[in-house]
Image (cartoon, rainbow, N blue to C red):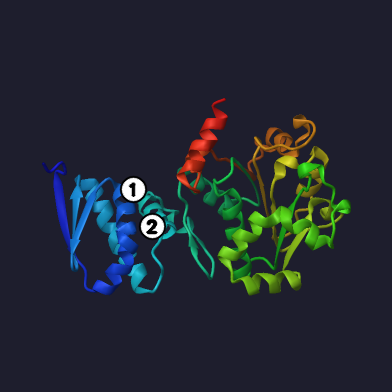
Amino acid sequence: MNTYPDFLHIEFDDNNILSSLFGIDDANLRMIEKFNKVKIDYRGNQVKIAGNKISIEKTKKTLLNLFEEAKKGIEIDEEKIKDIKSLLSLDESDSSKLNLFIQTKKRKIIPRSINQKKYFKLLNEKNIIFAIGPAGTGKTFLAVAKAVAALQSGRVNKIILSRPAVEAGEKLGFLPGDLKEKVDPFLRPIYDALYSMMPVDQVEKKINNGIIEIAPIAFMRGRTLEDCFVILDEAQNTTKVQMKMFLTRLGKNSQMVVVGDTSQIDLVSRSESGLLDAEKKLSKISDIGFIILNDSDVVRHELVKKIINAYESK
């Protein structure tokens, strides 16, 4: 018995492109079916979509967009499908829609949730932004994307990446190696984001010539940061004194993004967290933006959202 009330046929003009769109063993089709709650069948270059009218139209737009991407030689995978899904879900009446992309030379970043959309707007409007939320919500990734886009467009001359290093009670002076070797393990998520925005050799070159600077928060003292995009990661582990010191480094033509997860405070006393203190003291300043992300914004594996929910329910 057919449980789908409507159906639509689409004809594509290139079977080879269609094959790369569908994926190995039609994995991409199965994913689109799951996302849009439709049934997709095909024979040759003829595709049949069955479902309700809204889902069919959404699936048609998804397939047509993905087909155009595949024609450009772009690999169609889960991330690309999610990007197209997010693009199509943006409010068509939103006059600021065109500003809800972060375009780097390597890729286009699109918000995947309502809160990420709000985060994008803050990144376009505010000089200081606080992004607070659990792992996997894209708070660091989107900040790095905006920083790379600003650097590549010439809006800033430098990216500065910083964070406290207090995990496991380790102090930098007792760790082996030079400053970069000591800090690198703590900044691996930021490196991963950089490498997804820029070729690895370009990242390394810009680090070596100082265009991308990586330093612990203690090294910000006494500086004025001009023409920079500055990211403070793991901000929940800053002290109140460190947070104030960091925020007051802001100079002309610079932007700061402060990223943290208040459920992951490693300080001896939770009340000493500079992030909690800043949220309480600065949230009413109109020129500073705050975005609170939650499990509904998780963009990693679906299990991550379930894990976060399980821990937060205890």
164 left or right, relative to 143: right
Residue appearing at x 41%, y 70% in the figure: 74
Quadrant occupied by the C terminus = top right
The tag on residue 68 is none
Q: Is 177 left, or right, of 93 in this rendering?
A: right
Q: Is residue 17 left or right of residue 82?
A: left
The kind of residue on which mark 1 rests is Phe
Mark 2 and mark 1 lie on one chain; the one further toward the N terminus is 1
Q: Quadrant of residue 282?
A: top right
> Which residue is at 69% across, 49% downward?
233
Residue placed under numbered mark 2 in the picture = 81
Q: Position of residue 83 (x, y in %)?
A: 42, 57
Residues at marks 2 and 1 touching, judged by CB atoms closer than 8 Å: yes
Q: Residue at x 68, y 36 (%)?
A: 279
Q: Specify the quadrant that holds the N terminus.
A: top left
Q: Position of residue 161 (x, y in %)?
A: 71, 57
Q: In this view of the protein, which residue sits in the foreground, 302 or 293?
A: 302
Name the residue carrying label 1.
35
How packed mark 2 is, by other alpha carbons closer than 10 Å (few <14, some 14-19, many 20 or more), is many
State the SS at label 1: helix
- In the rendered structure, the answer to whether residue 117 lies left or right of residue 174 reads left
Rendering coords of residue 215 (x, y %): 78, 58
Q: Is residue 166 above or below residue 195?
A: above
How many numbered marks, from 0 up?
Answer: 2
Q: Note whether 15 is above or below 117 in the view shown.
A: below
* Type of amino acid under label 2: Ile
Q: Which residue lies at the image location 31% right of the left edge and 67% below the top edge? A: 67
Measure the C-alpha gap from mark 2 to mark 1: 10 Å
